[in-house]
Amino acid sequence: MNAADRRPISQRGTSWAKTITRALAKTAISPNQISFSSMMFAAIAGACFAASEVAANAIDRVLVLLGAALFCQLRLLANMFDGMVAVEAGKGGPDGPVWNELPDRFADIFILVGAGYGAAADPALGWAAAVAAVMTAYVREVARGAGAPGDFSGPMAKPHRMFAMTMAALISMFEPMWNWRGETLQIALWIVLIGATVTALNRAWRALAFLRQK
């Protein structure tokens, strides 16, 4: 895989990431299975977000919000390790690029739509944020197919979206202090929606400029 086609991740060069990659490479776990696990982690995160709206008591709500934050981060870790096991460990297959991209799109939808149902039962906002998130990747892949380099720029790329949703989950645990319930998730989804829209437009503009110059 061309290095330019991989998302730049600083943690990829850390000793702990390399150690885990070597351990995974010694097992029968394939990069595609790790990619699939990222989608499952995202589905759990989305379910936790949605459950926060109907949690029976404050303790249950804190637990599901902690779960949402945890599984958002596990989704990101799986996204990193599938590529490392495929490339650095040399276990990638011919269908790897499909598995690398497709589960990510479902993962964004699961998390953002789930958060929409948790944001004071405002699923339309979650769906809108999910569409914008998917468009960031769609623009990148269309541009790459036309000959432009892979563009992972922000301001609301996947790591930024997951940071926003993770922080929203953690801050939401303190909402009873302000007599809020779901407003933090609404704010986070608006940030993702606007940021992802700007990101998609920015990537499209950069790709067009590159292709015209080329």
Image: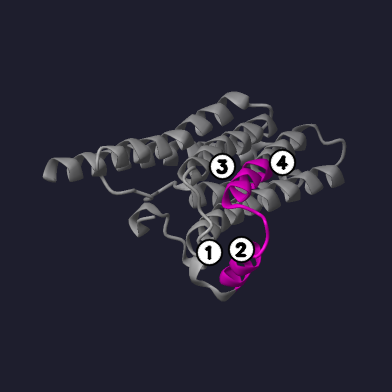
Furthest-top residue in this view = 124
Residue named by callout 1: 89
Q: Are marks 3 and 2 in contact (CB under 8 Å)?
A: no
Dot 4 amino acid type: Ile
Q: Identify the magenta region.
A: 16-41
Q: Are marks 1 and 3 in contact (CB under 8 Å)?
A: no
Residue named by callout 2: 25
Q: Are marks 1 and 2 in contact (CB under 8 Å)?
A: yes
Disc 4/disc 1 C-alpha distance (Å): 28 Å
Residue named by callout 4: 44
Mark before the other along the chain sequence, 4 or 1: 4
34 magenta-colored: yes
Dot 3 amino acid type: Ala
Mark before the other along the chain sequence, 1 or 2: 2
Residue named by callout 3: 188
Q: Are marks 3 and 4 in contact (CB under 8 Å)?
A: no
Furthest-left residue in this view = 213
Q: Quadrant of the N terminus?
A: bottom left
Local secondary structure at mark 4: helix
